[in-house]
Amino acid sequence: MSEESLMIAVKNGELKQASDLFELYSKQLYNFFAKITYDRDVAHDLTQNVFLRLIKFRHTYRDDMRFKPWIYQIARNVFADHYRKSKTLKNDNVDIETVGETLGDMDDEVVRNEQERILYLSMDRLKVEDREILLMSKFQKMKYEEISQVLDTSVSAVKVKVHRAIKRLKEHYFELEKI
């Protein structure tokens, strides 16, 4: 069954099908949250919340929708709600030493070499919106069309946002590389 067919079944009350969707998307969503929050426990909780909302708001899924953009929209909402409640959205002035300690707690695979470490430090310096769009486009390998559906904007606007986010990421990267 396709993802869309599984979701339509869930929408129609076949909640057992949600476990198949969980198997397909839990790892992707966990990685998305882990890279945006730098916290495994929070990433785990947020991933669980996405699937709770998937079940709770299954009636909002339209049969003509693609599933991936729909679930990532839920993920963005879960992420925004989490930080709105905890009031801990990161500002632009992040303490690099603290981020380094947080990154040290992540899997060795994620931060295997110095270039990756600098990349993740650079990512953390980005605004949440820039980090989010780069994670979707470059790490989650989402197509611009899918991202445009998630963000409810045009494909050309997504391309511009990705381009600008990459430009800012490069600036941060080269700045940190000098240190």
Image (tube, rainbow, N blue to C red):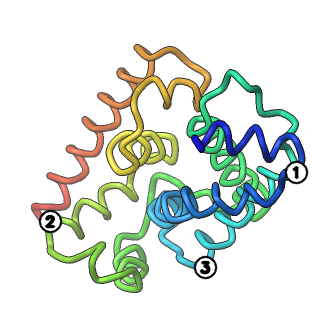
Q: Which of the image's four quarters has the N terminus? A: top right
Q: Amino acid at mark 2?
A: Gln
Secondary structure of the residue carrying tag 3 is helix
Asked whether, in this view, residue 156 is left or right of residue 64, the answer is: left
Q: Amino acid at mark 3?
A: Asp
Residue drawn at (63%, 46%) of the image: 76
Decide which of 31, 9 is in the foreground and name it. 9
Q: Which of the image's four quarters has the C terminus? A: bottom left
Residue position for label 1: 56
Dots 1 and 3: beta carbons under 8 Å?
Answer: no
Secondary structure of the residue carrying tag 2 is helix
Residue position for label 3: 41
Decide which of 89, 103 is in the foreground and name it. 103
> Which of the two discs, 1 and 3, sits closer to the camera?
1
Q: Amino acid at mark 1?
A: Lys
Q: Is residue 11 above or below residue 25?
A: above
Measured in 3D between alpha carbons, the distance from the residue under mark 2 to the one under mark 3, in whole angstroms, is: 25 Å
Question: Which labelled disc corresponds to residue 115?
Answer: 2
**Comes first in the chain, label 1 or label 3:** 3
Asked whether, in this view, residue 174 is left or right of residue 154, the answer is: left
> Which of the two discs, 1 and 2, sits closer to the camera?
1
**Comes first in the chain, label 1 or label 2:** 1
